[in-house]
Image: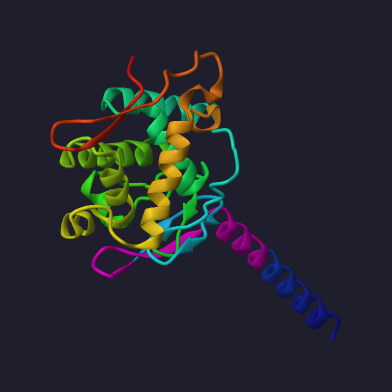
Amino acid sequence: MHNRIQSCLKVSACLFVSCLWLSQALWADEIVSVKDGNGRKIFINAGETRTKVDWAPGGPASAKAGNATLPPAEISHLVEQTASRLQVDPQLVHAIIRVESEYDPKAVSNKGAMGLMQLIPSTAQRFGVENPFNPKENIEGGVSYLKHLLDLFGGDLPLSLAAYNAGEGAVQRSGGVPSYAETQEYVRKVTNIYQSGSPQSGANAAGNKAPAPPIVRSVDERGVVHYTNVE
């Protein structure tokens, strides 16, 4: 009887240790289920932690956009480096990241958008992003997509932002910023942060950089609105 009790205790201890190890493994390497552009379910390793971004129908609604969170220095460096290489204003990239994810590289929306710049699986694949939770890859893919949109819409900022939020097809079909309330709010939020020149929204948030030139609005001969902070 004594031997039987000892055996039971050993089995229980082994089960406890196994469960503890399994729970730690699951916590340390969370698998996220998202849907790609074709509605297929895919599973992605989200790393150690994951923060779900609150989204309204059609896209990001809050993402803590009202808070003035300073970006980590390494993310500011990646933004500055990538945006400068692709000839996109780093301040604009920061404004998008702030609204999209509030600088959370593990953010996942209920629409399946992932990482700092909230790339959906089809966009990540389109721009060669293998791990959208890797800040370097995510920023590379997001800025590349933003550059594509700016070129596609002739530098028109509202149309480019609307396309980033709702898709370029939606903008092309509507002939302007779609009437979706969420998309219009998204364009307003990003534009306001970008135009404000707030240090919380720009690459100089990490310090040691002079303030960026003021944002200038201009309209070309085709009636297209442009925003620039180039002196």
Which quadrant holds residue 222? top left
- Residue 69, image x and y in percent? 59, 38
How many dots with numbers?
Answer: 0
Q: Is residue 116 visible?
A: no
Q: Report x, y in % for residue 95.
A: 44, 37
Asked if residue 155 shows in the view, the reply is: yes
| Left or right of residue 122, residue 200 in this image | right
Q: Position of residue 4 (x, y in %)?
A: 79, 82
Boundaries of the magenta span: 18-41
Residue 192 lies left or right of residue 87; in this view the side is right
Quarter of the C terminus within the rendering: top left
Q: Nearer the viewer, residue 42 or 208?
A: 208
Q: Is residue 30 magenta?
A: yes
Vertical comparison of 98 with 42: above or below: above
Q: Nearer the viewer, residue 26 or 167?
A: 167
Asked if the magenta segment contains residue 217, the reply would be no
